[in-house]
Image (cartoon, grey):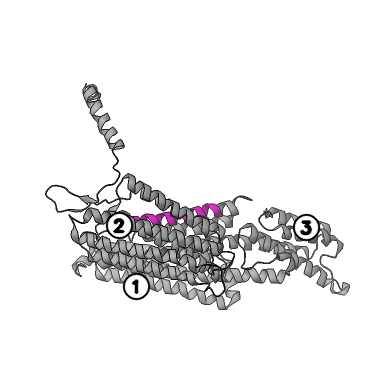
């Protein structure tokens, strides 16, 4: 009976009409421009606050990550110059994202004006993507247009922010006079910054004597913008960052970046498992990368601030996220390359074992041994269309020519160098083809057909050595950042626990950094890089700090509170 009465009341015509009118008004009433001031009766004028990110902010984050994914797909991190180019482009889009975010978390309101501004900001992100394909660390005649485009886009985005801040300063000028002054200072800085970017367009004119690294001036401007906006906001009553959802925005962007690492895992599965199905070692490799991404997510979000940060702690927390995001992205990319390299190493090991088997006593018939050798290469399912057509031709030529020579001749025949050189060239070209299939190419990669197998192998060894060094460098730095985040977020309430937690992260980071010294001893590096242990080194490090935090939490909840005073 009660449900029927409730249904009849809920479906009463007057109730339905009221709900329909309210919903219609909510959907249709969008002001052209709206004040950022919350003017509730009895309260002093203050900016409207929101604790969660809005849908349009999340949509803007997706454009950031789409830019990052596109740049990653077109730029291999295979030498120091490529690494700095990656960091440079990431800095351009990250600091632009930061400036937009610092405005949105305090002043953005759903209005026609703000929607138009957001559309222009999204267009700027698309513009970054168009120029990213030609971005390098040096300004050259063939890519000068990319730097000119980036300079214009940066200038336009800052000019738009100057307009948005100016509009909000007008709203604040009567009700929140000190806040209006601070916003006016920020608007003026954004205007000057935009003019600087626009004037730099002429600095990129193709002419003699242009400094190829002049674009690094942008990073000076990025730093000035960030410090002026944050410093002015913290010094001006009413527009501070403490009562905003800046931590939420940083956390969401970090989550999306880690999500990009999850996409890398699925790519890894497609490249290693897709051709021939699951094997024992492919499972071990993918498990290592997957657990690394999972523990990385856990390690970061366990350190998310659980209370309002102080004025300076808030700024340091936000500013540290740029180098932290750089480290995070490089770490995820490096782990993917290491896993792919392990898969390639296993395939090459099978090939080497097949060659040795062909020359062991009792030796198989040469035609049978060559057939097995050919089947071993076919089982690798190399996609020669991915830049390995020349290697395919060379491999086919060697396999077709092997029956014309003794496969494993005795020394008396005088033909040992011929067979040895042919098999060496075969291994070298298979190596180059496998790396090309996995989209791993050494820097300045010339035509492989003009190189000997020894030169090919030397190029890939140099590439893997570089990846090894930068992987453990960024792994070490990530632990240092986690140590800083422990102190800023006050992960533990007791000073002793907080100090132990931070010191452990720094110590483990130094231990990971010491692994870079292995690069001086190639046999040691080779044995480490061809072992799955390299994928689990960072994973086990993260697991140790997570386990330690749980033990410290238990200590706090039981005996620790009676021994020490709480952190104020």
Q: Residue at x 40, y 57 (%)?
A: 157
Q: Which label number is shown at residue 553?
A: none
Of circles 3 and 1, the one toward us is 3
In the rendered image, is residue 491 in sight? no
Q: Is mark 2 on a helix, strand or loop?
A: helix
The residue tagged 3 is 396
Relative to 523, is 305 above or below? above
Return the residue at label 1.
503
Asked whether 531 falls inside the magenta stretch, the response is no
Mark linked to residue 165 = 2
Q: In which quarter of the image is residue 91?
A: bottom left
Q: Where is residue 73 in the image (x, y as percent from the top left)?
A: 55, 57
For label 2, count other residues whose C-alpha is less than 10 Å away and answer few (under 14), some (14-19) or many (20+): many
Indicate whether 380 appears above or below 3: below
From the top left corner, tell me how far across and down residue 74 is, in percent: 56, 58
Question: Would you place residue 217 above or below residue 45 in this image?
Answer: below
Along the line of sight, the residue nearer the viewer: 144 or 253: 144
Which quadrant would the C terminus be assigned to in this image? Answer: bottom left
Image side of residue 551 versus residue 73, left or right: left
- Residue 266: within the magenta? yes
Label 3 with label 1: CB-CB less than 8 Å:
no
- The residue tagged with tag 3: helix, strand or loop? helix
Q: Which residue is drawn at 67% across and 69% down?
A: 457
Report the magenta residues as a range: 243-267
How much space separates mark 2 and mark 1, taking CA atoms? Answer: 42 Å
Q: How far apart are marks 2 and 3 (CA)?
A: 66 Å
């Amino acid at each position: 009976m009660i449900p029927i009465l409730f249904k009849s009341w809920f479906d009463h015509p007057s109730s339905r009409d009221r709900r329909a009118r309210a919903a219609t008004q909510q959907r249709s009433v969008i002001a052209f421009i709206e004040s950022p001031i919350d003017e509730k009766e009895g309260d002093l004028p203050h900016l409207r606050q929101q604790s969660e990110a809005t849908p349009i902010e999340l949509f803007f984050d997706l454009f950031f990550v789409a830019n990052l994914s596109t740049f990653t797909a077109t730029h291999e991190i295979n030498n120091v110059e490529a690494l700095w180019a990656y960091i440079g482009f990431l800095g351009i889009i990250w600091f632009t994202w930061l400036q937009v975010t610092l405005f949105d978390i305090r002043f953005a309101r759903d209005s026609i004006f703000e929607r138009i501004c957001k559309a222009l900001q999204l267009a700027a992100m698309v513009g970054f993507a168009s120029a990213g394909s030609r971005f390098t660390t040096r300004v050259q005649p063939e890519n000068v247009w990319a730097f000119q485009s980036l300079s214009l886009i940066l200038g336009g985005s800052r000019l738009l922010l100057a307009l948005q801040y100016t509009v909000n300063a007008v709203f604040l000028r009567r009700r929140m006079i000190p806040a209006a002054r601070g916003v006016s200072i920020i608007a003026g800085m954004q205007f000057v910054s935009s003019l600087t970017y626009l004037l730099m367009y002429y600095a990129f004119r193709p002419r003699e004597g242009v400094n190829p690294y002049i674009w690094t001036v942008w990073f000076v401007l990025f730093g000035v913008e960030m410090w002026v906006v944050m410093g002015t906001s913290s010094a001006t009553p009413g527009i501070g960052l403490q009562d905003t959802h800046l931590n939420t925005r940083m956390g969401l962007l970090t989550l999306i970046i880690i999500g990009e690492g999850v996409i890398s895992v699925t790519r890894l599965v497609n490249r290693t498992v897709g051709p021939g199905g699951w094997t024992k070692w492919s499972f071990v490799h993918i498990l290592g990368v997957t657990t690394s991404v999972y523990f990385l997510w856990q390690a970061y979000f366990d350190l998310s601030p659980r209370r309002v940060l102080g004025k300076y702690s808030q700024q340091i927390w936000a500013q540290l996220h740029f180098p932290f995001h750089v480290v995070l992205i490089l770490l995820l990319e490096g782990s993917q390359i290491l896993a792919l390299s392990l898969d390639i190493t296993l395939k090459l090991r099978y090939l080497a074992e097949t060659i040795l088997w062909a020359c062991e006593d009792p030796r198989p018939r040469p035609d049978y041994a060559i057939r097995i050798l050919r089947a071993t290469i076919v089982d690798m399912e190399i996609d020669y269309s991915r830049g390995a057509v020349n290697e395919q031709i060379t491999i086919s030529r060697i396999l077709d020519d092997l029956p014309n020579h003794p496969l494993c001749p005795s020394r008396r025949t005088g033909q040992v160098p011929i067979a040895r050189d042919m098999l060496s060239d075969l291994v070298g070209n298979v190596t180059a083809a496998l790396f090309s299939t996995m989209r791993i190419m050494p820097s300045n990669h010339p035509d492989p057909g003009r190189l000997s197998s020894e030169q090919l192998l030397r190029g890939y060894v140099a590439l893997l050595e570089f990846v090894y060094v930068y992987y453990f460098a960024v792994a070490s730095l990530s632990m240092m950042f986690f140590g800083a985040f422990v102190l800023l977020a006050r992960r533990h309430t007791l000073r002793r626990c907080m100090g132990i937690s931070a010191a452990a992260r720094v110590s483990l980071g130094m231990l990971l950094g010491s692994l870079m010294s292995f690069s001086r001893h190639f046999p040691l590096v080779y044995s480490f890089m061809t072992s799955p242990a390299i994928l689990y080194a960072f994973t086990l490090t993260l697991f140790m700090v997570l386990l330690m935090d749980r033990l410290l939490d238990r200590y706090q909840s039981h005996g620790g509170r009676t021994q020490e005073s709480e952190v104020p």
